[in-house]
Image (tube, helix red, strand yellow):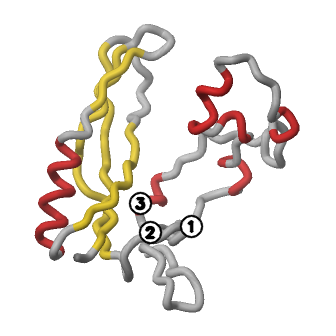
Amino acid sequence: MPWFTAALVRGAHIVGPASDAAIGDLVCKLIEAPDAEAAYARALELGEASTETYVDDDGIEITYGFVGLAALEQLPAPPTDGMQLLTTALPGAPGRLVVSKGDLAVFQSDEADGSDEDDEYDDKPGDDVDRDANLDDLVDAEPFDDSAAAPLKPR
């Protein structure tokens, strides 16, 4: 059965004082479906189920809700370890997106124990670069075809 990637676009509804800037996010999901129509239906289901509400550090309640799909692409082969799913051109200096090992989400729970074990990885090139870049262009990406000599270009 074919596999697809779906890029879900979510927009934020903010309860309380907020800036004029609209915020949202792009959530990429992996879908196994018999065909494009079934993948599309599943992507919409996942999008509708992706609503999240949280209260930020300032006590402002923010709800992310599904807006629509930015992309739905069939993978050239079933997913495997290390398979490239997406290649995206980055607007501006790419170093602004680099974070230290300790700031990666998978290592966040390790910080609770106060361990400084991985401090050698904390200072990386680009740490002094502004990471609040506009990444709207990220939705214009195509999946990587492992059979091709190079990644596909953004559309």
Residue 94 in picture, x, y percent from top left? 69, 56
In this rendering, is residue 87 above or below 67? below
* Viewer-closest of 82 and 94: 82
Q: Which mark is residue 141?
A: 2
Give yes or no for contact between labels 2 and 3 (Cβ–Cβ under 8 Å): yes
Residue at the location (52% across, 90% down)? 148
> Which tag, 1 or 3, sits closer to the chain's start?
1
Q: Amino acid at mark 3?
A: Val
Which residue ends up furthest to the top in the rendered image? 59
Tag 3: Cα neighbours inside 10 Å, few (<14), some, or many (≥20)?
many
Gap in Å between the C-alphas at discs 2 and 1?
Answer: 8 Å
Q: Which mark is residue 89?
A: 1
Residue 23 in picture, x, y percent from top left? 40, 35
SS type, badge 1: loop
Q: Is residue 143 left or right of residue 15?
A: right
Q: Which residue is mark 3?
A: 139
Gap in Å between the C-alphas at discs 1 and 3?
Answer: 10 Å
Residue at the location (50% across, 84% down)? 146
Residue at the location (58% across, 91% down)? 149
